[in-house]
Image: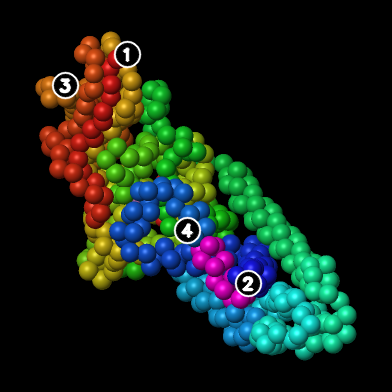
């Protein structure tokens, strides 16, 4: 077993050196061309929906670092195995590494929007790893067993293992030669001191080589990180340089209640992008194509010149569990989408807008919904700033009343007028519903589950949403007592969540259950039946346990 440590280590180091090189080159080409990102993206796209659901619900926003970490662990295991393989089967090991490089290159080329150059980092990773392994592996071969006065029959087996390397490597050769040297073998008594000499030389040359590779890896990796950060900074600067025009149609005076707006840095983030797309707004344009009479192409400046609207809109994710965090409310600034579509001339029969985005996703939004008078927009601003990079800079779609996966494409590059019968968007291909109107939902934000509450008046509060229908009532139930009406705070429109408050006279000590449900403006009570988010959104009344002391 111990004899395998250095070969395994040489495999690991060779792979690390190759990957660091790839990251460095990818940071110069474009971040999406990194083999880790390309393979990660391929894994995300190929992961069956239930597994993805499980990952998102269990690991939340950590799912992406976790995915990259898992890929690294798998690669490390493969690399160690290849290092061990190299001891006896040098060619096979080098071919295996080359094959891994090709897998990365294929993944990078198969990503949506890939360019030929995207294969380069993976190919280099394979080539550099192979060269490093060819250099390290001979040095990694363990020194032969202690010389014995009588040549042991298994010493032949011991040298056999080193054989493929002896011609090319002096260190391994010296080690292999020693026991065959009759004088050395007979003149020196066997013991740790004497056997250490050749082993130590071999070990030293391995350690030096390993150290060099580790150092090079760290340098390349560090440099890649620095370049990447400066690239992100450049995108941030381009974003910072933008002055958003004042809205032609301003929103109502902002609501004053704390918590009504979700600050940008707290706004949930859900997307398939392993690296946040960095788009230079000056290079960006939006195509409106497909089933339209007059296809158009709009630059970022073209959009800034349009009359802008400012609206408070709540956005939520279809993957949100009952009581979950994937919902936020912001003040958005954007170009109304309906007039742009009318100007392009939507043809009869076109019922789906297929948005394409820089991360390769497609999002299908019903034409009828966008044209029915609601404030569907191409958003450029969020809470008084240009869109944050994570939330779709420079331009995203927003459709009040629809879950994000069918109405809120980030980093958009084109809108193609199409039909639902001819094209399934990304999540629909994975089994999610074609139509995603938001379901009425309510959430208790305080007290927290399992809170210990001193007896007296307890403020129970939270949010409820049914975007574009609006919330007409929120009710709270303690244990099996009758439902109580919560007080609703004012809202600017039906497109936002509603904050609600109810003062609970919590006089009876002991364990209690709190339950909430909302009623939308059509009079429909939020569905009680528990349902998972897949395929069209969770239902059920949130329930939590607290203790009055
Ligand atoms: N380009 C792109 N847009 C996207 C997604 C994505 O993966 N890629 N995810 C969608 C989903 S599922 C949701 S819920 C919202 C989330 O938007 P946010 O991250 O700004 O909160 O973006 C939508 N738009
Ligand atoms: Mo979502």
For residue 210, what is the image quadrant?
bottom right
The answer to whether any part of residue 310 appears in the image is: no
Residue drawn at the location 49% of the way across and 45% of the way down: 387
What percent of the width, then of the height, locates residue 238?
61, 49
Q: Residues within 10 Å of mark 1 (few under 14, many from 20)?
A: few
Q: What secondary structure is found at the residue carrying circle 3?
A: strand
Residue 4 — which label?
Answer: 2
User: What residue did someone put label 4 on?
Assistant: 67
For residue 223, what is the image quadrant?
bottom right
Q: Residues within 10 Å of mark 2 (few under 14, many from 20)?
A: some
What percent of the width, then of the height, locates residue 129?
66, 74
Comparing marks 3 and 2, which lies closer to the viewer? 2
Do tag 1 and tag 2 residues touch (Cβ < 8 Å)?
no
Q: What secondary structure is found at the residue carrying circle 1?
A: loop
Mark 4 or mark 3, earlier in chain: 4
Mark 1 or mark 4, earlier in chain: 4
Q: Nearer the viewer, residue 521 or 512?
A: 512
Viewed as shown, does residue 257 lie left or right of 403?
right
* Magenta run includes residue 78: yes
């Amino acid at each position: 077993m111990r004899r395998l440590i250095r070969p395994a280590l040489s495999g690991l180091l060779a792979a690390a050196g190759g990957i660091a090189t790839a990251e460095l080159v990818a940071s110069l080409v474009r971040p999406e061309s990194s083999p880790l990102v390309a393979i990660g993206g391929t894994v995300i796209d190929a992961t069956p929906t239930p597994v993805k659901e499980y990952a998102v619900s269990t690991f939340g926003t950590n799912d992406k670092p976790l995915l990259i970490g898992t890929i690294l662990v798998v690669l490390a295991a493969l690399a160690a195995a290849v290092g061990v393989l190299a001891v006896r089967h040098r060619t096979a090991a080098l071919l295996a590494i080359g094959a891994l490089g090709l897998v990365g290159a294929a993944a990078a080329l198969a990503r949506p929007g890939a360019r030929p150059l995207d294969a380069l980092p993976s190919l280099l990773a394979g080539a550099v790893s192979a060269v490093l392994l060819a250099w390290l592996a001979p040095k990694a071969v363990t020194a032969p067993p202690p010389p014995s006065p009588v040549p042991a029959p298994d010493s032949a087996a011991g040298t056999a293992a080193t054989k493929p390397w002896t011609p090319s490597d002096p260190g391994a050769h010296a080690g292999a030669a020693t026991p065959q040297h009759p004088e050395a073998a007979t003149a020196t008594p066997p013991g740790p001191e004497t056997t250490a000499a050749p082993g130590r030389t071999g070990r030293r040359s391995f350690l030096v080589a390993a150290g060099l590779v580790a150092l090079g890896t760290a340098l390349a990796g560090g440099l890649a990180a620095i370049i990447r950060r400066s690239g992100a900074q450049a995108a941030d600067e381009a974003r910072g340089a933008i002055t958003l025009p004042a809205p032609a149609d301003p929103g109502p005076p902002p609501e004053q209640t704390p918590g009504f707006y979700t600050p940008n840095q707290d706004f949930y983030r859900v997307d398939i992008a392993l690296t946040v797309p960095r788009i230079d707004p000056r290079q960006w344009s939006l195509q409106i194509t497909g089933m339209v009479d007059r296809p158009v192409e709009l630059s970022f400046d073209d959009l800034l010149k349009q009359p802008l609207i400012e609206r408070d809109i709540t956005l939520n994710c279809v993957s949100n569990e009952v009581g979950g965090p994937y919902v936020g409310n912001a003040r958005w600034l954007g170009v109304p989408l309906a007039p742009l579509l009318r100007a392009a001339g939507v043809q009869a029969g076109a019922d789906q807008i297929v948005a394409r985005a820089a991360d390769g996703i497609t999002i299908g939004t019903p034409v009828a919904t966008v044209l029915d008078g609601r404030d569907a927009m191409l958003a450029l601003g969020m809470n008084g700033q240009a869109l944050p990079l994570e939330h779709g800079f420079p331009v995203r779609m927003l459709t009040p009343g629809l879950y994000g996966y069918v109405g809120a494409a980030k980093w958009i590059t084109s809108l193609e007028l199409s039909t639902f019968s001819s094209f399934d968007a990304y999540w629909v291909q994975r089994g999610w519903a074609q139509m995603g109107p938001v379901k009425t939902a309510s959430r208790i934000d305080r007290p927290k589950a399992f809170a210990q509450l001193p007896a007296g008046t307890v403020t129970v509060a939270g949010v409820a949403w049914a975007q574009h229908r609006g919330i007409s009532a929120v009710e709270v139930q303690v244990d099996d007592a009758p439902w109580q009406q919560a007080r609703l705070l004012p809202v600017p429109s039906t497109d936002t969540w509603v904050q609600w408050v109810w003062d609970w006279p919590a006089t009876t000590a002991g364990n209690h259950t709190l339950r909430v449900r909302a009623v939308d403006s059509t009079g429909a009570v939020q569905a009680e039946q528990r349902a998972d988010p897949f395929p069209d959104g969770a239902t059920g009344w949130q329930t939590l346990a607290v203790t009055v002391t």
